[in-house]
Image: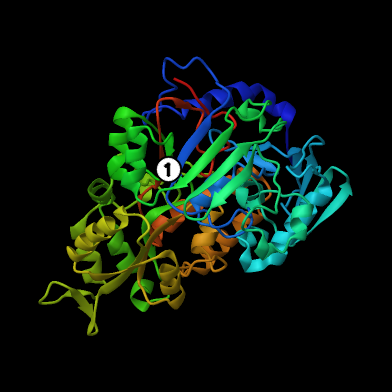
Amino acid sequence: MSRKRTQRALIAAAAAGLALSLALTGCASGGGTSSNDAGPVDGGTLKFAIGNDPISFNPTGVGNGNDTWYVTRQVYDSLVYQNPDSQEIEPWLAKSYSVNDNATEFTFNLRDDVTFSDGSRLTATTIKANLDDAKAAGAASSAASYLASYTGTDVTDEHTAVVKFAKPNASFLSNAATVTLGIVSDKSLTVPFADRSAGTNIAGSGPFVLKSYTKDQSTTLAKRDGYTWAPASRGNTTGAHLDAVEFSVVPESGNRTGGLTSGQLDVAGGIAPNDIDTVAASNNTVERANPGTVFGVYFNEHQPVIADESVREAVGYAVDAQEIRDGALNDHFAVADSVLSQTTQDHEDASSVIPAHDPEKAKQVLEQAGWTEGSDGIREKDGQKLKFRISYINNFGPNADSIALLQQQLKAVGIDSVQISGTVPEFQETIKSGDYEVAWRNLSRVDGDVLRTDFSSAGTSNWPVDDAELNQRLLDQVSIGDQAQRSAEIKSLQKALIEQHHFVPVHELTTVLGTTKSVHGVSLGADSRLDLLVNAYKAN
């Protein structure tokens, strides 16, 4: 059956959606705006600190993760919008859409009033040109994985585009809602892909435009007049309240927090876990768990020792997720109850199948599998010591503490381990080489298809499950056109990955922004990254 979403179906939810969006601007406990807020105020500059230079202002290019997307989300709109509260896909540049039965064709009926900052208008040809361009860019585009089976777009009239895939792609709508598939003008696409990163030669249709940029220092966006096509659930048809947004690069988390406390900043991104309560005591926080796969133990089943299911089962009993979360983080970061975080589409509470912490049971499983304890307390089998190389990225401070606690828990049952840490490129190189037994990380994606990315043979990771049947199920779920059936399968897969000892969940990741009490309307989107700032304003 064809699935459709129209603006008419969303009007009734618009007011409630706005209220929920504004509620996110309160304190960590989820409270609303301060009591002395008299409502939106027009004008002013929002001073926003980020940790890293954006690197690229090309929405489909490769930038610096969140710090790039915080900026580019304000400049480029997407075909659809994913509501962070309901997780429903809503119209945006497309006023309605439909999907065929096997999710290989997506028809978008576009708004006829959208313009880009260079004065040109949005048409179906624009959509085709953008998707064709991102596909042609290949690995240079951060949207490459979203368009792997993209075959082209049919322009049936000026405002109707039919996007086609060679294989079912049920996750495309969620992907189309991200800024990674943000739409730029036709003229922008005449500029070579590699030459668009500076952003001065590309035009978006968003509520702000790039005014100035100084590498490693600041990026200033200016309000764009006439912006009337924000998603309906944002409840804004008159454009941004702010005159400008100034993103300053402040690498040290402590300096971002200090700038917020002193009043030099209005918003600080990337609040460190240890600083959350300090910020909340005198300011406000905006918090949301990241969707996607959670932090936990990812097994490299290519390694013979990990291919032994008994070893993986024992690790499940050895790990104390609560102890790791409490020791490395705090209660702003939830102990994981599944492979997927609670903000992920089709998350399933799998607590009932997560092994309870039981070191004695872990020892028993290893003993029965022939792993006997040596004189040094480390188990061995056929002359081989039971030792893991644990690889992780050093871009999130608590990771090192989490690994140290994990190592203690493993050693308590006779498993030795060493750490392999590094930058994102270094981590990726380690994963590519396969010279590790366990990886510690997460992957933020809104759609449950992230399971295929993370655990299947067709994924971008190097730890596919060594189970042909489960692997095929991971591959097939994206082909299920019926949303209810697909949702049920994704929920079932989460339990299967845990029950069959392919993953040990530990904790979720939470994005935290700090804002002064005078700032209102700042919220996080479905991807737990900065949402549109059309409703943001400063008031006493």
The extreme bottom residue here reads 383
Q: Where is residue 272 in the image (x, y as percent from the top left)?
A: 33, 45
Decide which of 216, 369 is in the foreground and name it: 216
Q: Name the spot of residue 522 as percent of width and height, x first.
A: 50, 32
Residue sitting nearer the eye, 142 or 242: 242
Residue 135, by quadrant, is bottom right
Quadrant location, the C terminus: top left
> Badge 1 local density, few (<14 within 10 Å), some, or many (20+)?
many
Q: The N terminus appears in which quarter of the rendering?
A: top right
Kindly identify the residue that appears in the image at 68 percent across and 60 percent down.
Answer: 147
Q: Name the foreground residue: 349 vs 433.
A: 433
x, y percent for residue 465: 47, 67
**Would you say 508 lies left or right of 525 here?**
left
Q: Provide the secondary structure element on which disc 1 rests.
A: loop
Can residue 297 be seen here? The reply is: yes
Q: In the image, what residue occupies the spot 54% across and 57% down?
A: 55
In terms of image quadrants, where is residue 517? Answer: top left
In the rendered image, which residue does mark 1 sit on?
269
Rendering colour mode: rainbow
